[in-house]
Amino acid sequence: MDRVPLEKKVLSENDRIAAALRARFHAHGILCLNLISSPGAGKTTLLEQTLARFGRDERVAILTGDVQTDNDARRLARFGFPVRQITTGGACHLDARMVERALAEWRLDDLDLLLIENVGNLVCPASYDLGEAAKIVVLSVAEGDDKPLKYPAIFFRAELLILSKTDLLPHVPFDMAAARDNSRRVHPEIEVLELSATSGAGMETWLDWLEARRHPTPAAAPAPVATSTKSAP
Amino acid sequence: MPGFGCRVKKGSLTPDTCSSMHELSIANSILEAARAEAARRPGARLVKVGVRVGELSGVEPDALSFSFEALVRGSDLEPLALEIETCPRRQRCSLCGRIFRVVDFDLCCPDCGAFESRCISGDELEMVYLEIEEAQVAPAPEMGLRAAARAGEREWKNGPSSLGKESPQ
Ligand SMILES: Nc1nc2c(ncn2[C@@H]2O[C@H](COP(=O)(O)OP(=O)(O)OP(=O)(O)O)[C@@H](O)[C@H]2O)c(=O)[nH]1
Ligand SMILES: [Mg+2]
Ligand SMILES: [Zn+2]
């Protein structure tokens, strides 16, 4: 019996494609963001409200993943920016190859912002690198402030937590301070912002975050993400 | 199987299908990687695959074992086994350098009480080893068997008639 050592990532094939995508985004000066949440936390509504606030000359495109239907793509296409639906036909996450295929018909030179709405799921998408510059996790106040502790993987990997649907706060038992605290216990460096896409409260802060992320001044460059360096002594 | 996601054939998995959807796709990736490795060693049989799963990886070890068994059962890889090594989260204190295990998301350094630290492990999802049984009967007799089989095939193709009327060469 032989034991063959194999030090490699289980998802190394996905990671390889994602690394190639990341290099392409970098070469074309594209900021790619991967939005992740449980179903219905408000990703599409947030994107709609974001596109509604963009000028016509904005060089933005959207990829939206769903298990079935192209509802989200149709909702987003109304704003006149390029939108593509990725229908996974069963898979509950996007992977790098799906993104690579979806991008095949776009001229990356025409873009400088690519927003990816992942399939509604707080677990699976956390494992799949899509070549994004940052993952953003959206948690609606209707879901409970304990979610960062229950689904730590995505909060650990996300650069930004958006607490959404804040207009519902009077109607649901959700402790903002506890949500922030729980997310920081999982990921001390995570940034947090609150908004309601329907009332518009907090949308400016989100657009400011986006703007700062797109054009980082050297001083305001994003802090390195807490990644594991397993081999450290 | 490119594009294989966290999908389950209807009725094929019980009792905790929902929580193992994700693990099923991870199990499939492990099998693909193991297959690729085995393909480089003709004649070898895969016995066991070892993986490392961090507690921040988002992968449930139990659900992963369950999914792995479900995929292997009845396949050409049966009875391939999976060994999972789970990795707790460890942080290194930025002030005193102490490495400590994080329990209950408590990021306070047990030595100096500081809260500034860096995560150094816990998000692993890695292949660690493959246990392989090299062709036990040594390559030579194996090839001998194949050659014999081929010879038999030739004999059959030529048919019994070749023995009598016409010489095959
Ligand atoms: N009250 C309130 N409702 C919201 C807000 N944002 C979204 N919703 C509602 O929440 C529901 C789901 O919103 P979507 O934007 O479709 O959520 P999603 O995350 O894209 O959903 P999936 O793509 O299916 O995962 C819809 O009925 C929205 O109208 C908000 O800020 N406040
Ligand atoms: Mg949506
Ligand atoms: Zn310390």
Image (spheres, grey):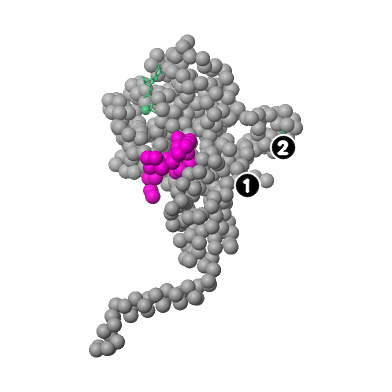
Quadrant in which residue B118 is drawn: top right
| Residue occupying the point 46% across, 21% down | A140
User: Taken as a whole, is the magenta stretch helix, strand or loop?
Assistant: loop
Quarter of the picture holding the C terminus of chain B: bottom left
Mark 2 → mark 1, Cα distance in angstroms:
16 Å
Q: Residues within 10 Å of mark 2 (few under 14, many from 20)?
A: some
| Residue occupying the point 57% across, 54% down | B129
Whether the residue under disc 1 has CB within 8 Å of ligand 3: no
Residue named by callout 1: A231
Residue sticking out furthest to the left: B165
Q: Amino acid at mark 1?
A: Ser
Instruction: Magenta stretch: give its range.
Output: B1-26
User: On the rendering, which quadrant does ligand 2 occupy?
Assistant: top left
Q: Estimate the x, y position of residue A188 in percent, counting from the top left.
A: 59, 29
Q: Of helix, strand and loop, which one carries label 2? A: loop
Q: Estimate the x, y position of residue B86 in percent, counting from the top left.
A: 60, 43
Q: Is residue B18 magenta?
A: yes
Q: Estimate the x, y position of residue B136 in percent, counting from the top left.
A: 54, 68
Residue named by callout 2: B98
Q: Of helix, strand and loop, which one carries label 1? A: loop
Please report, as a chain letter, where disc 1 is located: A
The number of numbered discs placed on residues in the rendered structure image is 2
Q: Amino acid at mark 2?
A: Arg
Quadrant in which residue B155 is drawn: bottom left
User: In the image, is A92 to the left or to the right of B57?
Assistant: left
Up the image or down, B64 lies above or below A39; here it is: below
Whether the residue under disc 2 has CB within 8 Å of ligand 3: yes
Up the image or down, A1 lies above or below A219; here it is: below
In the image, A100 versus A214, the foreground residue is A100
